Image: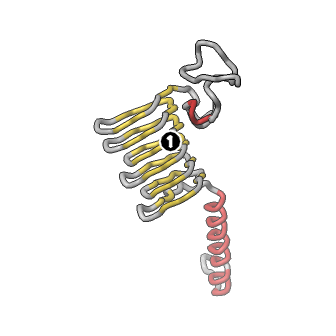
Amino acid sequence: MFTKNKNQETNSPEPTKGASAQDAIRGAAMKPAARAASIICADMKINGSIISEGALQIDGVVDGDVSATDITIGASGFITGEVKAEVVKVKGKIRGSIRARKVELESGAHVKGDIVHASLQIQSNAVFEGQVKHADDPLKDTGPKGATPTATNEPAAPVGHSGSASFGISTSAS
């Protein structure tokens, strides 16, 4: 009543195991996996922009804009360019603007550039030179990347303008 012959015993379970293993592999491939952070090691230098849909750990040098979901600049990390992410944690150096919902400048951080944020935390012994602007949606692009008038390469006053707002710029009609 509860006996099985050898053919059923050896043939029946294996296709079920094989099918379930294939289903598990397909299921795992379909599910969004929790990704580990991509790492730019301390001995790397990148010239160009980086775009990632996941987390990014930068311990090396990046000469270009960086965009990711979560960016951590390690103590040996250095970025020259715009940094844009949901969360930015800085332990190293940035020369450029930061746009993020949450910005954390940790002890030892050096940032020279403007910060647009929804939340900002600056720990003691962090160095920051620039302007800070709170925004409900800091990731929304509004205006040029350079927040300073010198970055636009436009003259401060139109040629031939004789108003009092010339700020020391003289124009002569010769």
Relative to 87, is 126 on the left or the right? left
Above or below, comparing residue 5 to residue 71 in the picture: below
User: Where does the image place residue 62, in percent across and percent down from the top left?
Assistant: 50, 55
Residue that numbered label 1 is attached to? 96
How was the colour assigned to the protein in this rendering? secondary structure
Q: Which residue is outermost to the bottom?
A: 6
User: Where on the picture, by quarter, is residue 111?
Assistant: top left
Relative to 73, is 171 on the left or the right? right
What residue do we see at 47% from left, 37% from top? Answer: 113
Q: Which residue is outermost to the front?
A: 174
User: Where on the picture, by quarter, is residue 2?
Assistant: bottom right
What residue do we see at 42% from left, 65% from top? Answer: 43
* Along the viewing direction, whichever of 95 and 2 lies nearer the viewer: 95
Total marks shown come to 1
* Along the viewing direction, whichever of 15 and 28 lies nearer the viewer: 28
What residue do we see at 51% from left, 51% from top? Answer: 55
* Along the viewing direction, whichever of 36 and 101 lies nearer the viewer: 101
What residue do we see at 49% from left, 34% from top? Answer: 114
User: Where does the image place residue 48, in percent across and percent down from the top left?
Assistant: 59, 56
Residue type (three-letter) at the residue carrying disc 1: Gly
Tell me the quadrant of the picture where the N terminus can be found: bottom right
User: Where does the image place residue 166, in percent across and percent down from the top left?
Assistant: 59, 19
Tell me the quadrant of the picture where the C terminus can be found: top right
Under tag 1, what secondary structure? loop
Q: Which residue is outermost to the left?
A: 125
> Crowdedness of circle 1 by 10 Å Cα count: few (<14), some, many (20+)?
many
